[in-house]
Amino acid sequence: MLDDRVVRVKVTGDYACFTRPDLKVERMTYPCMTPSAARGVLDSILWKPEFQWYVRRIIVLNPVRFMSIKRNEINSKQGRNPIVVEEKRAQRNSVLLRNVAYIIEASIYMNNATDKRMYEKYVGMTEKREGLFPRRVKKGQCWRRPYLGTREFSAEFMSPEGNEQPIQETIPIGSMLFDIFYDNAGKPQPLFFEAVIRDGVLNCEVPENDQMIRSSHMRPPLGSEVSSAIYEFNRQEEEAV
């Protein structure tokens, strides 16, 4: 069941690169954050096996500005054998975004939720019963450092101040990667949607979002060792809060 409450988090960074998969050799960024990148930021702040994030909107706060840099990369994928960087190094151009700022609006989806009160623990917004996610955002807590497309472009996150305004631009993007869908057999399938930034807002409530809810890679099987370890870790963290 999808919760109707919407949480908001502001994300900023000096640089970002949301790589277009159709341009492989040299990286070229989309003009704004992708839904999968937004979900990655939310998962970095709070991830639980019993729910998953449903990204509703991405609000673009700063004008879209591109820049080009040259980066050292390697020509081979990491495998069992170590890579000698000096032999495989290659310099490639990358087209990045600079000075970015977004507000991510999202809700949580719980497959086995039977009562709306089950969501209070995570996204409660009342002063006396504030959920885990709002508290973690205010304290700057995260499982891992959020990043903007690639790990070298780390992100700062905070609660929105309330006076932020989206850019007054309409930018047609065309086909954008929404996320990677995994079927019950674990086979990956990329999902694309027709994206348009309208008056500074990218709407993510599209059919592909509903399909991602059925993706099998979001949570480990109940009763597995991984699930048990995650449950114990979460229990200890909640006791410490």
Image (cartoon, grey):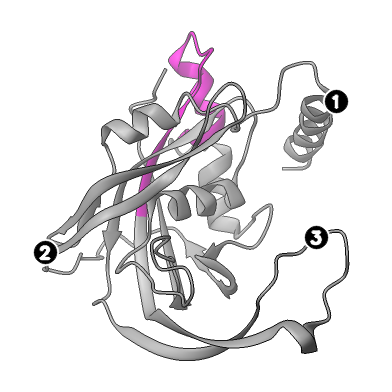
Residue at the disc numbered 3: 79
Please tell me whether residue 116 belongs to the stretch shown in magenta.
yes
Residue 128 visible to the viewer? no
Q: Amino acid at mark 2?
A: Thr
Could you say which quadrant of the image residue 188 lies in?
A: top right
Q: Nearer the viewer, residue 222 or 180?
A: 180
Within 10 Å of the Cα at label 3, are there few (<14), some (14-19), or many (20+) other Cα atoms? few
The reply, left or right, for residue 76 in relation to residue 38 is right
Q: CA distance from mark 1 to mark 2?
A: 48 Å
Q: Is residue 204 above or below residue 118?
A: below
Q: Residues within 10 Å of mark 1 (few under 14, many from 20)?
A: few
- Identified at 46% across, 55% down, the residue is 37
Percent position (x, y) of residue 48? 63, 34
Q: From this viewpoint, which residue is outermost toward the top?
A: 114
Q: Secondary structure beneath disc 1?
A: helix
Q: Secondary structure at mark 3?
A: loop
Q: Nearer the viewer, mark 1 or mark 3?
A: 3
| Image label count | 3
| Position of 62 relative to 193 (above/below) | below
For marks 1 and 2 on the same chain, the one whose residue lies earlier in the sequence: 2
Query: Is the residue under label 2 in contact with that under label 3 (CB below 8 Å)?
Result: no
Residue 218 appears in the rendering: yes
Q: Which residues are magenta?
A: 104-124
Mark identifier at residue 170: 2
Q: Amino acid at mark 1?
A: Glu
Name the residue beneath numbered marker 1: 225
Q: Tell me the mark number nearer the camera, choosing from 3 and 2.
A: 3
